[in-house]
Amino acid sequence: MKDLIRLNTSLTEKVESQLNEQIRIEAASSAHYLAMASWCDINGYENSADYFYKQSEEERAHMLKIFKYVNDVGGHAISPVVSEIRQEYGSFKEIFEIALENEIAVSKSINNLVDVCYKEKDHSTINFLQWFLEEQREEEYVARRCLELFDVIGEETQGKYMIDKEIPRITYGGE
């Protein structure tokens, strides 16, 4: 009976496949941020560690939101395998460079997913993804602002300490 119920879905195979790929990307992002949080923690950047722990939780929440959507509309969400997560970083600044690159890559992936949905005429999924498009704009903004601190404050003397203190104050649009 379950198979018959799952046949009644508005998702095309292509959209479902792309949504499952996005689930994998969000899970990998969560794992990357968790590794970054650990690196910051063991290197004395407590505020940045908290920031990355929060980012990890948010990415996992994004993954679950998509996961549940796929199942709710009659598709089959696949629990992702996440491996090869980098654990070591060359510098405090490098972590924030990688974080910004990651957010840009996630934004591109979601935009590509929306393009697939347009081609497949899946307007319901496009509507669902609008929240993610806005969320990614915010995520990129915050990641960019964090990285800009390295240029504004500098890393000399107490610069890294000051950057770590400023990280929790950065929000989207000054919220």
Image (tube, grey):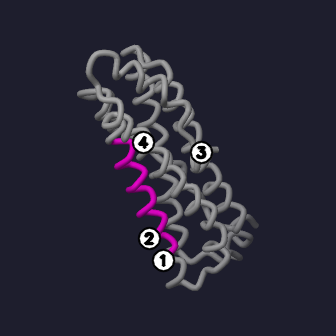
Q: Is 70 within the magenta?
A: no
Q: Residue under circle 1?
A: 116
Q: Residue under circle 4?
A: 82
CA separation in Å, label 3 and label 4 = 34 Å
| Residue nearest the observer in this picture, 115 or 22 | 115
Q: Amino acid at mark 2?
A: Asn
CA separation in Å, label 3 and label 2 = 29 Å
Furthest residue toward front: 152
Tell me the mark number nearer the camera, choosing from 4 and 2: 2
Q: Amino acid at mark 1?
A: Val
Neighbours of disc 1 within 10 Å: few (<14), some (14-19), many (20+): some
- From the top left corner, tell me how far across and down residue 140 is, in percent: 46, 52
- From the top left corner, tell me how far across and down residue 17 is, in percent: 49, 67
Q: Amino acid at mark 4?
A: Val
- Disc with the residue nearer the chain's start (4 vs 2): 4
Residue at position x 57%, y 33% from top? 54
CA separation in Å, label 1 and label 4 = 24 Å
The magenta span reads 98-114
Residue at position x 62%, y 49% from top? 64
Q: Amino acid at mark 3?
A: Gly
Q: Is 102 within the magenta?
A: yes
Report which quarter residue 40 is drawn in: top left
Q: Residue under circle 3?
A: 174
Left or right: 59 as drawn, with respect to 101: right
| Residue nearest the observer in this picture, 133 or 145 | 145
Badges 2 and 1: C-beta atoms under 8 Å apart?
Answer: yes
